[in-house]
Amino acid sequence: MSSSSQLTVALRIRPMNDVEKQRKSNFQCVYPLDGQRVLLVDPEKFENNILRQNRQHERQFTFDAAFGPQSEQEEVHNATTAPLVDFVVAGYNATVFAYGPTGSGKTYTMVGSDKKPGLMMLLTKSLYDKINPHEFTVYLSYLEIYNEVIKDLLNPNAGVLDLLEDERGNVQVPGLSRVKAPNTNRILQILHEGNSRRTQEPTAANKTSSRSHALLQVTLYKNSVQHGKLFLIDLAGSERASQTKNKGQRLKEGAAINRSLLALGNVINALSTGNKGRYVNYRDSKLTRLLKDSLGGNSKTCMIAHVTPSSSNYDETYNTLVYANRAKNITTRITQNRPASADQPYEEAMKEVRKEAARKTQMSHAVSSVQLNRDSDKSSSTSVEKEPLRPILKWNTSVNPGGNRMNNNNNDNRKFSSLFNSLKGQYLANTEKQHKLRERLLQANHEACDVEMSRASKMAILAAWEKHNKEDEEKFSDIISRIKIDVTEQETRLSQLHEMRQKIEKAIRKGYDIALSLESRMKALAKDQHQREMIELLVKMADNDAEKMALHSDSALQILRLKKQENSLQKVHKYEQIADKLISGELDDAERDKLQQEYRIIKNQLNYHLIPLRQDSPIVSWNSQLLTNNGSKLRNALDLSTMLTRLYTINQRLINTGYVQRNLIHHKKYRRHGKDHSKAIMNVTAKIRPR
């Protein structure tokens, strides 16, 4: 039996920290009015801005619970999450997740400290207080999503985990470890072990910033059968690069966090509209796929939004309150879990039998004939005709050969259907994995092309120096040494990229073989035209994705070369301007010497910059699988590469012949392969001036 349940939304305001208190311009902009309402004050209210004097500067928000800066962990637990324990013990699923910007106290609420444990510890402790340890068993799993990669926090040797869906649409993480927790002490130990492996790095906005989303799964088993689940989720906080001062890896982490939280925000917006025919895109990130049941499926869910009271974070606080207010409108359909082997009630069985009898009358005839063979008496035959349902019930429970054969056929059909759906899910998962591998291959090829071009320029500089400037070795020793170090590092990186490409190629070929195997198995199991058409559609989608990635890969490499060429053409214009001034002759000696020096510098720069573009060897995409199977469909991309190579050759001849004026072609014109590339080539005009 199922019932509707509104999402429970609570708000928690953390205290102002020392840094915020030291700023004189800061003040508390959000206040709890009572146990449910909060007041948000816009800092512009006190700026006396005439243009915004009619703007609404105060807003009230109402939630299921609101907690001020002085609230305690036990208070939050008792008011929001404690009732969820009864749901889990009764055989339902429940979810608690913390939402809010970075540094707002989410990890403190969920994990807490040794003296003040968070909801993860308090909820599991309450769960043990409600159950009989001889009847129930508790298992824990702990994972994190870091840069869209799933990792097992309880088993660091597990590697990267996949996210798959079974034939019923339930999200599964194969290979995720499951640890038995017989008591609260073991739970505390498991939580400490998992939290110590979480990815945390300091930023300017938060000294203990969580760089990943963490999900603790508590599974309750009753008499060795799964009974209920409790999900406890600590989300990473949204952040602004201008506030966190992040660079490099931290900046990439922040971008991944913001993308997943944006996907979560889009899901909340879609679910809060209340439109039954809406489309909710859960597949934009792994976070939303994991939260699919929690937000729109079979779970009693509590969202605890967190905000900072400081006026300097007003925008983040306002956005969090708006999303939390929308989340109140989300409705889930909770259903009590039951074992897969549980029998249907008698009334449902009778109802199903009547439907089957009305739909397939031949079944009753077959059963009647079996009954006639067992008893040749006419009265028995008459009773069968008067009461057709009785022999059908007997067919379901009898052990006669005819009944067993029909029952076995139905079981076989169900097994075939389940196996077919399982293979279909494996094929889709393999297609998604192949797509990600091709993306990695594209990135590796792009970086290898860039590094190789830079290395070629530096090698040319070293060759020219060794040929002409050997006597000035001491004068340029630092520069030459630095160039040699750069070349060595680039060669090392190229070697690493080559190995990486080989591994990715091998994985792509293996995935291709797996796809062929799954395709053949699905075709063997296909029972009707609908399933055969589905197989063709899946294969066609995978092929189209492969072709698109191949074209994108080749296009990206050509765009990189075009960018290099644009830079070189700009130097050609500068080279031409200086040459014109030198030829004009209207210069004094000082200006002429200065221009000649600049002329020589630009000439050398231009020469070394064009060296990589003059190389005859093409940039190979290394996607051997695609080029082998779809070579004919890549002809346009290869023709473009040939035309661009001709363009480079023509440009270099013009440069060597005289002064050149060109109309630069932006690389975006080459992104669409459907255009007439000959027009793009004709746009490059040259006017040659004789010396």
Image (tube, grey):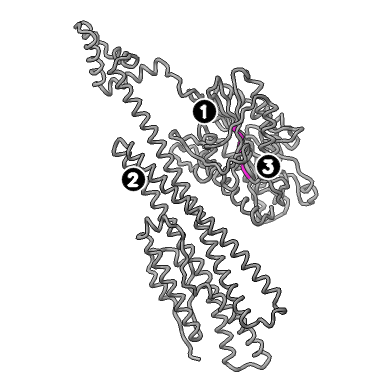
Which numbered dot is residue 536?
2
Which of these two is toward me, 618 or 197?
Answer: 618
Task: Report the residue at 21% width, 9% height from top.
Answer: 381
Question: Mark 3 or 2, which is nearer the eye?
Answer: 2
**Which badge, 3 or 2, is on the more N-terminal residue?**
3
Q: Give the residue number, with chain letter if any, for mark 1.
A: 334
- Write down the region rendered in magenta: 212-217
Distance between the Cα atoms at labels 3 and 2? 50 Å
Provide the major secondary structure of the magenta segment: strand
From the top left corner, tell me how far across and down residue 247 is, in percent: 66, 56
Q: Going by the image, does 10 lie left or right of 449?
A: right
Q: 191 or 464: which is nearer to us?
A: 464
Q: x, y (%) of residue 220? A: 58, 25
Q: Please state which amino acid type lies under the numbered disc 1.
A: Ile
The x, y position of residue 123, in whole percent, is: 65, 28
Residue 213 is covered by the magenta coloring: yes
Q: Is residue 31 above or below residue 624?
A: above
The disc label shown at residue 159, or none = none
The residue at 47%/54% (across/down) is: 505
The amino acid type, in three-letter code, at marker 2 is Glu
Which mark's residue is nearer the viewer, 2 or 1? 2
Would you name the residue on which mark 3 appears? 307
Tag 3: residue type?
A: Val
Q: Is residue 546 above or below residue 470?
A: above
**Residue 124 falls in which quadrant of the image?**
top right
